[in-house]
Image: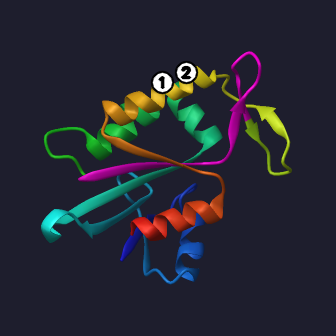
Amino acid sequence: MILVDSRAGSKELITPLKRLGLVVEEVTLEFGDVAFEGRGEQGKLVSIGIEFKKIDELIQSLRTGRLAGHQLMGMRGGETPLYDWAWLVVEGEWKADRAGQILIQSKCGRWKPAHSQMTIGELDKQLLTLELRGGLHIIHTKDRPRTLRFLVHLY
C-alpha cells in the first residue's frame, strides 16, 4: 500500500495513482507527500518517503528555507530518520536566460521568469547540497505522466 498525503499539492497524485492500479491510502503524513515500505538489501524492510514539488514550489521552498530547514530535517534528520530513503521529485521544465535567471514553462508552453528570482547556479548548488549533505535523492520529471511513472516504478 502506498500512502499519499491528502493535503494540497500531493492530493492531486491520488486519483492518477489509483488509476494505474496502486492501492492508495489517503492520510496526513507528518513529513513528505508519499510514503511506503519497500525491500532493501537482503529483503530488509525499508521506509521510503517522497517529497513532491513542482519547479516553482521548489524554488520558493529553497528561498524560504522550508525544504532544507523543516521538510528535509523531518524526513532525514535526527538520530533515527523518519525514512530510510528520502526522495525529492521535481516536476516541470526550466531553463536559464542569458543572465542565468531561471525561466519556467507555463501550462501554455511559454517560458516565463520564476516568481522567486533565482539563478540556475543557485538552484544547482542548493540541490547538490541537499543530495550530498542531506541524503536526499533527487529526480527531475518533465511532466505528470513521467512523475507517475517514476512513483510506480519506485514503488
Considering the numbered disc 2 on the image, is that residue within a helix, a strand or a loop? helix
Judged from this view, the residue extending furthest toward the top is 99
Amino acid found under the numbered disc labelled 2: Glu
On the image, the x and y values in percent for residue 83 come to: 26, 53
On the image, the x and y values in percent for residue 26 come to: 45, 71
Label 2: few (<14), some (14–19) or many (≥20) C-alpha neighbours in 10 Å = some
Magenta stretch?
83-103
Q: Quadrant of the N terminus?
A: bottom left
* Of residues 120 and 86, the one drawn nearer to the viewer in this rendering: 120
Numbered tag placed on residue 122 in the rendering: 2
Q: Which residue is mark 1?
A: 125
Q: Are marks 2 and 1 in contact (CB under 8 Å)?
A: yes
Q: Is residue 142 magenta?
A: no
Label 1: few (<14), some (14–19) or many (≥20) C-alpha neighbours in 10 Å = few
Q: Is residue 79 left or right of residue 150?
A: left
Considering the numbered disc 1 on the image, is that residue within a helix, a strand or a loop? helix
